[in-house]
Amino acid sequence: MFSRPGILHLQLVARLSLLVSILAALFAPGLLAQKIELSVDALKTGAKIDRNIFGQFSEHLGHGVYEGIWVGADSAIPNTRGIRNDVVAALKALKVPNVRWPGGCFADEYHWRKGIGRSDRRSVTLNPNWGGVVEPNTFGTHEFLDFIEQIGSEAYLSVNVGSGTPEEAAEWLEYLTAALPTTLAKERAANGHPAPYKIAYLGIGNESWDCGGNMTPDYYLDQLKIYSRFVRNFHPEQQERQAMRKIAVGPGGNGPRWTEWTETIMKAYQSHTWSWDLSGLSLHNYTVVKWPPAYASVGFGEAEYAQILKSTLEMEGLVSKYSSIMDKYDPQKKVALVVDEWGGWYAPLPGSNPGFLVQQNSLRDAILAALNLNIFARHADRVRMANIAQMINVLQAMIITDQEKMVLTPTYYVFKMYVPFEDATFVPVSFNSGSYAHGDQTLPRLDAIAAKDTSGKLWLALTNVDPNQRAEIELRLAGVNAKSASGETLTAPKVDSVNTFASPHTVAPEPFRAQVEGGKLSLTLAPKSVTVVAIEP
Ligand code: AHR
């Protein structure tokens, strides 16, 4: 059919196209990048990664509580005593260690008595911080603690220092925790809970330097001493080992004002007497770049991806800075740095109530979450608690609802993938991250942490920040037998890919496996991805 010169021509074309495809493969983005060597010695362990760094925050704000958690017992949305079942099931899978409630700025205007007793007789108030909407108080103390029990978590209550009194806060704690038949304990029993509640964490005020009362550090310190002294937990099982931990308001960013605040509290702590104590100092830091928040949570490109992620890495500097101030006054690290508000804060979604802080949640947020969790894990000796803002429908949420519909966000999946790191022991990882640059932003290309879980299994979390190139990892392991690595990886077509009610699985984890070959474990990470693997012997 073909003449000899025709066959030769075809062979030449075939060879040329093979050569072209080999060259194309060699110069394909993923292969151009050099292999990144990662070394982990499983025998070199560090601090415990406290499960509480995976804490959540739920404020009376927008649809964070009403609709997000609470639909009421008469709702057509399946619920248990008014709390929606789909949300509870999703949160149970996250093994949420603690939930901070009722705020935020809301906490310093919250009066607990308005949220107890028969729901049809509760005061209807306003929520001036967040859209000025009506606050029905139908979700109050008992409903919150029912929710905590349903998801299997612990309560982190923020008491009202701004517009409340030490007496009001002390009575709330007595109402909650007294086992003896005081009038308040009997009232609790009459409201349906004869047994005292356990309250694991107590936040003394919220942002008392701003929405919590614009106090000076010295004025707040005086308040802190009074609340710490008189707001007592009477639960019989919380008198010693399980004692309630008290968390003071700490810094809210970078700069001399926050240094002074931290110095004031920690210096006083150094010489504190029996009459007051402290277990944690909070840090609030959002990834926002511009104030008021102007970056979009959807429909952005690589420039905003790089800017936001570069900005989120500032958490490392803040945590290091405040840890070293704390080290000066508390070298034994008795006081934890509690990052109880963090996450991406973007422009409100068009058409939403700006006071409701509604935003979408993209693959970028998943990467942002992983980078912050890694920072907390690396500082596990001091950072022993953190609360992402906020759990449902507000800011960087785990869950978005609309009436009966619910969707899990990319951030939800990162928290789920990181569950094995709860209470695991940190194991140092050495690597040269390389860099990823876009425009005038340059960031580390790779991030990684490792830890041994409570059964001794070694886990690795690897983030490839680069949205264009795969990362080829060569893992050198010591102190552990390894045949393979298996787990999950999370990526999506675009940096701004999101999950919606119509398309809920655009950003969802996929199984991931890697084998040991020639004594080495090679892992290929997709561009813009988070991967969590267990090392299998
Ligand atoms: O999370 C939203 C708000 O941000 C909180 O109410 C406040 O503490 C912070 O300023």
Image (tube, grey):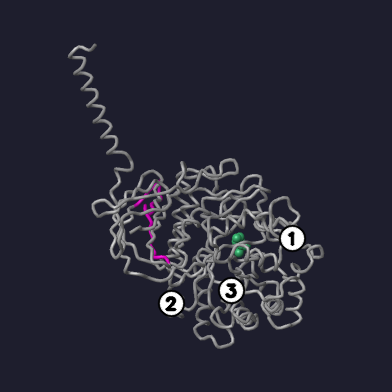
**Mark 2 to mark 3 CA distance (whole Å):** 25 Å
Query: Residue 169: image x %, image y %?
Result: 68, 76
Q: Amino acid at mark 3?
A: Ala
Instruction: Single out the mark in the foreground, 2 or 1.
Output: 1
Give the residue at x 29% y 38%. 27
Which dot marks residue 135? 1
Q: Is residue 528 left or right of residue 392?
A: left
The disc label shown at residue 200, or none: 3
Q: Secondary structure at mark 1?
A: strand
Q: Which residue is mark 2?
A: 327
Q: Is residue 361 placed above or below 19 in the rendered structure?
A: below
Considering only vertical position in the picture, is 400 above or below 43? above
Q: Amino acid at mark 2?
A: Asp
Label 1: few (<14), some (14–19) or many (≥20) C-alpha neighbours in 10 Å: some
Name the residue: 32% across, 69% down.
44
**C-alpha distance separating marks 3 and 1:** 26 Å
Neighbour tally class for label 3: few under 14, some 14-19, many 20 plus, Cα within 10 Å: some
Q: Nearer the viewer, mark 2 or mark 3?
A: 3
The amino acid sitting under disc 1 is Glu
Q: Classify mark 2: residues with Cα within 10 Å, few (<14), some (14-19) or many (20+).
A: some
Classify mark 2: helix, strand or loop.
Answer: helix
Q: Which residues are magenta?
A: 435-453
Q: Is residue 439 magenta?
A: yes
Which badge, 2 or 3, is on the more N-terminal residue? 3
In the image, the residue with mark 2 has its CB under 8 Å from the nearest atom of ligand 1: no
**Quadrant of the snapshot with the C terminus:** bottom left
Front residue (pair 243, 128): 243
Residue 350 is situated, as x and y percent measured from the top left of the image, at: 63, 45
